[in-house]
Amino acid sequence: MLQEESDLSLVIAQIVQKLKGSSLYAQLERQAWASLQRPEIKLESLKEDIKEYFKISGWEKKLQNAVYSELSVFPSPSHPAAPPEHLKEPLVYMRKAQGSWEKRILKSLNSMCTELSIPLARKRPVGEQKELLNKWNEMGTDEPDLSLFRPVYAPKDFLEKEFFVELGLTTGQLGIDDSTQVPPELFENEHVRIGQKVLAEQDSAAAQQYIRQGSPTALRAELWALILNISSQPEDILYYEQLKTNVIQHDLLVDSLIYKDVKLTASNDDYYFVFEDYLYQVLLCFSRDTSVLGHFAYNSASPPKSYIRGKLGLEEYAVFYPPNGVIPFHGFSMYVAPLCFLYHEPSKLYQIFREMYVRFFFRLHSISSHPSGIVSLCLLFETLLQTYLPQLFYHLREIGAQPLRISFKWMVRAFSGYLATDQLLLLWDRILGYNSLEILAVLAAAVFAFRAVNLMEVTSLAAAEAVLADLSTLKVMPLLQIFLFATVT
Amino acid sequence: MAGKVKWVTDIEKSVLINNFEKRGWVQVTENEDWNFYWMSVQTIRNVFSVETGYRLSDDQIVNHFPNHYELTRKDLMVKNIKRYRKELEKEGSPLAEKDENGKYLYLDFVPVTYMLPADYNLFVEEFRKSPSSTWIMKPCGKAQGKGIFLINKLSQIKKWSRDSKTSSFVSQSTKEAYVISLYINNPLLIGGRKFDLRLYVLVSTYRPLRCYMYKLGFCRFCTVKYTPSTSELDNMFVHLTNVAIQKHGEDYNHIHGGKWTVNNLRLYLESTRGKEVTSKLFDEIHWIIVQSLKAVAVNASPSLTSSTANDRILKYNLINDTLNIAVPNGEIPDCKWNKSPPKEVLGNYEILYDEELAQGDGADRELRSRPGQSLGPKGGRSRDSGRTVLTTWK
């Protein structure tokens, strides 16, 4: 009992510490001071009165949402003597695997740098800055020569790593305890009504619970913002503008990687091509956002370090590269693209993406034992397939069409670019609702189940890939439902 | 050969021919006995011109109504709508109601438009009222974006002025007839780009009016960001969305051709602007279509050239569904057979308006304007079935 209590107070202390630096804290302080003017605040019962005032005015709710937000990425309690790397990743062999993966990426990046004789970063001449500022809203029209650049890595590179990791972990907790229902007409009106109420209450936890059953299109943008605890404050907009200024002033090598990625993926997509310019505006700023470094505390990965020219190895001259520590890979822009259907104001779009990244997406390309990490998702996928469709599983392996080879890319991209947008958004509703990416593995298995009949007849990897090439007509929720609740062992 | 539909066409497009062949129809020449003739615009003109006096027999169908050009030609379309509105007004129909400024409440869907050279002086008067406005010039008889340009100074259209040195008015040949409309320079932009809607509507009969809208319409985007700035008035890639024009732009992407399905548009608008506004938008679009049809006829030449693979599939299916409705049961047409086709054959079409059904619903389904609100043809329609039965309007 005592242990639990002290654990709890430790958690509380840590969260308080975290929140002390936030703008919410400053606002609460200001509000508290201002409230002294109010007649209902009496000196004798100062603490209670202020607390009451906070409750009525909605500030308590904001604090609750912030705490809730911190909790969703809070690492599980660990031994007090555990070193910080254990918070990032408790398993040694996982850490080693992530370590060697990182070395490989860095090597790739560095060699590209030397081959092309392009610096990792350089300050732009004034003329170039002016030009870029003018073009800020239509960077899509730029045609820089990108032929020599190649993506630092693509999902398939990552996959090969996975073959070595045989984990004994069982990831049976699907995290889907509630029944997920496709809203029929009868259900829909009531559901919308409840959604509006949740928004009016501005309660993150309630929103998260609500969205497990999917979000009505008209409410989705607001609901996601509430769950991710994003509220466009003036300082957020200012921060985004500052990032934009950084982009204008300095050119980074990763910028070219971003351009190339957008041109190759989003620009050719039936749904997302319209938003090409927004993608640059988000991703270029993202690379320069040092606040993203904070997530490495609970990410098994570590940001690459670079040294000022001539000062190799001297820690005082070390900087993270890129500034946000995240090297974009082929397909990275597809994490942002679907969000453009919800937010058309650049700074808000930016904030939402950043939060989605540091809560979810980063787990899809770092090696860890976390249940939402890509490794666990792979294991979950294979386990599900093997358990519920053993015939199919063995047939595919026999013909050399390892199921994971096909589904891996879907999961790494959280299905973006593979599903129709409306379906993708319904899927991401559940990711937010359950605060987990496991549903990606379940959906992948469900897709195989759905096309099982055709897959049983193929005799090669190429043919299997052809059967699963086009997911654009799939309806996500019925597939998931059938797989989860209609499958009999 | 009793029972096999005989077809002719003078348009060599696979999306058409494949559809005819898959039904087992027999190809014949135009001089033989035919049942179904898919005609090019030129042929229609010849076949139905006053001189030839051609009459279709009871077992023949063609793909355009003889008066289709009443809506294809921009000047005729404008005339028809103006005339239709006046007629309704005369009848005292509630549809023709106006607000305190004299604007039509329900029929104000054509921007201020004049015919040139005929209405030149009227146009000048209007132009002078707001001299900083932009106007768009469109040749009456052309399509696919040809010959369109924007002006913001009277000098740019001097040649249409009726002031001529000769004393008698020399009538201009129809080739030079243009319509000039007030340009809407604050269009809805997505991703900073202008777009238009390509919707397919099938009219199977005029009396009673029976029309269908293809559910898989699409939006066509400009490749270049929109700017109302006057320096870009000449840049057609900014202002015109026709694929024929955009295809030649540097940024035109051949994989997707700059298009979105109407469903994507709906999703985007609902997500960013809310459901009510979006539903209202689509209702009003449907309303405009039905009213325009009532005013007259259908656009002559939707492009049957496919620009991308997806496009080819779309058009093939479109023709397929069209034929299923127009030639029911694949049997030889009979002009006395006038029933509504059953729901199953509609394919991707949905009923836009069926006059018979609408009238059968009783005389009390008059247009009811909402108290205090003057927008939209809602009447007695219930909100959530908005997508299916649109036949309750009058």
Image: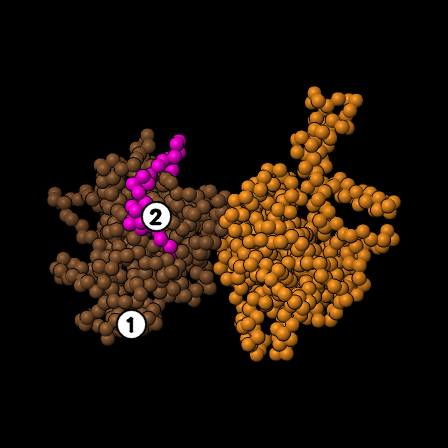
Magenta residues (range): B349-376
Locate residue B386, reporting x and y percent.
42, 47
Instruction: Tell me the orange chain.
Output: A
Which quadrant would residue A169 be assigned to in this image? Answer: bottom right
Find out whether residue B364 is within the magenta segment: yes
Tell me the residue that label 2 is attached to: B391
- Which chain is home to disc 1? B
- Name the amino acid type tagged 2: Thr
Secondary structure type for disc 2: loop
Which quadrant would residue B165 be assigned to in this image? Answer: top left
Quadrant of the rendering where the N terminus of chain B is positioned: bottom left
Tell me the residue that label 1 is attached to: B25
Q: CA distance from mark 1 to mark 2?
A: 33 Å
Q: Nearer the viewer, mark 1 or mark 2?
A: 2
Instruction: Tell me the brown chain.
Output: B
Tag shown at residue B44: none
Q: Are marks 1 and 2 in contact (CB under 8 Å)?
A: no
